Image (cartoon, rainbow, N blue to C red):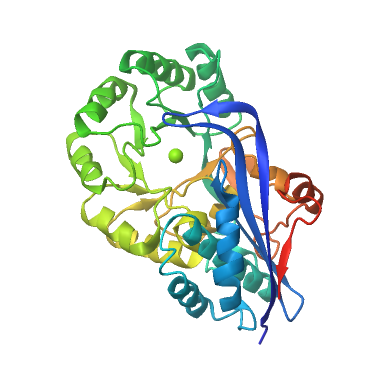
Amino acid sequence: MPKIQSVSVCVARVALDNVTSFATRTVSARDYCLVKLRSTQGVEGIGFCYAGSAGGNIAKAAVEELLAKKLLGQESLRVEGLWQDMYQESLLQGRAGSVMRAVGILDIALWDLNARAAGLPLHLYLGANVTDKVPAYASGGYYLPGKTPKKLGDEMASYVAAGFKAVKMKVGRLSPKEEEVRIRAAREAVGPEVHLMLDANNAWSDVPTALRYLKSYEPYDPYWIEEPFGPDEIDMHGRLAELTPVIVATGEIACGRWYHKELLDKRGAEILQTDACVCGGITEWKRIAATAASYGVTMCPHWFHDVHAPLVAATPNARYVEFFPDDQVLNFRRLIDRQLPHKNGEIILHRTPGLGFSFNEKSVKKYALTPARPWTVIN
Ligand SMILES: [Mg+2]
């Protein structure tokens, strides 16, 4: 049985080419915490997460000081047990936020390692629902200086021209009137058949305000309204869902199966956007998706199509993968050595063992917070 021989961890900070905004935040750089697990058989599995505009070192410290020691010398196939050991070890510091992200990236690396050792692409190793491709939506529509509604419409139309049948844009930063002009431009640009998702990124602080905005959005047939409130406002999500005909979607910064159970009990979302790099890894994501299936709720996981395409492929109650057509907002693709192709709005799944890509070590060195020694190796 292969055992875990070493854990390597790194923080890479990748600046955005253009400072970019959404409803509640403006982003100039992204921190990614990266891990590599090496087995006694010489196989390597990788994991990664977005750790915020800054603060990647918090997740790295959790790997170094709390979690790596729970994995070293352990059998890599004991995935459920190792998840429980890491969760238990970080009970006082973790359960959400950066420490749960650290648990998640190590769990992802375990799945990747085991799938690579088995010689199977991750979606087949997970027991695929589909084997060749998964539907994706193009994600964009951010707020940039000088970006007029016309330019926003042109951007959305370019995704449809590239084959996507669903597109997403940001909302909630401007007044309801200004927002309506943007959404109308987007709808007119993509036509009536395309799914148009709206992402509010925790824009509103109460249900009446959210309803006021949504009233101005409704004529343009939004497919969903995403993250109307902060993630802990579970009751408000449930109340809003009762009062608007628009589907409420949320979950991208939600952790753990218990939080998701409460959200489902209160009917706060018909679509869960749970992110495996946030919620506690692939192990926890699978539990959450299985519970969601019992509620008739659909999974559309949040960004990082590189890890979510195989999860959507292995999950019957999953619909879309979120896909960023370029590296302007989600610039993680600069750190890896292979990109998944898409065609007709679908991501084509690969047949390479595990996640099917590795870190591009040259890029990692370039963007690492400590370029002289990008990786801290624990063994
Ligand atoms: Mg979002």
Q: Quadrant of the N terminus?
A: bottom right
Residue 244: in sight, yes or no? no
Relative to 83, residue 3 above or below: below
Rendered residue at 54%/15% (across/down): 147
Quadrant of res 160: top right
Return the x and y of residue 170 as percentages of the image width and height: 44, 28
The mark tally for this picture is 0
Residue 48: in sight, yes or no? yes
Return the x and y of residue 372 as percentages of the image width and height: 81, 53
Q: Quadrant of the C terminus?
A: bottom right
Along the line of sight, which residue is nearer the eye, 22 or 89? Answer: 89
Return the x and y of residue 13 as percentages of the image width and height: 66, 44
Rendered residue at 22%/57% (across/down): 265
Along the line of sight, which residue is nearer the eye, 66 or 71? Answer: 66
Judge from the rendering whether residue 97 lies leftward or rightward of residue 248; answer left or right: right
Relative to 142, residue 112 above or below: below
Judge from the rendering whether residue 340 lies leftward or rightward of residue 222; answer left or right: right
Return the x and y of residue 290 as percentages of the image width and height: 37, 64
Along the line of sight, which residue is nearer the eye, 173 or 88? Answer: 88
- Displayed-image quarter of ligand 1: top left
Relative to 48, residue 146 above or below: above
Rendered residue at 48%/68% (across/down): 283
Quadrant of res 41: bottom right
Relative to 144, residue 203 above or below: below
Judge from the rendering whether residue 339 lies leftward or rightward of residue 274; answer left or right: right
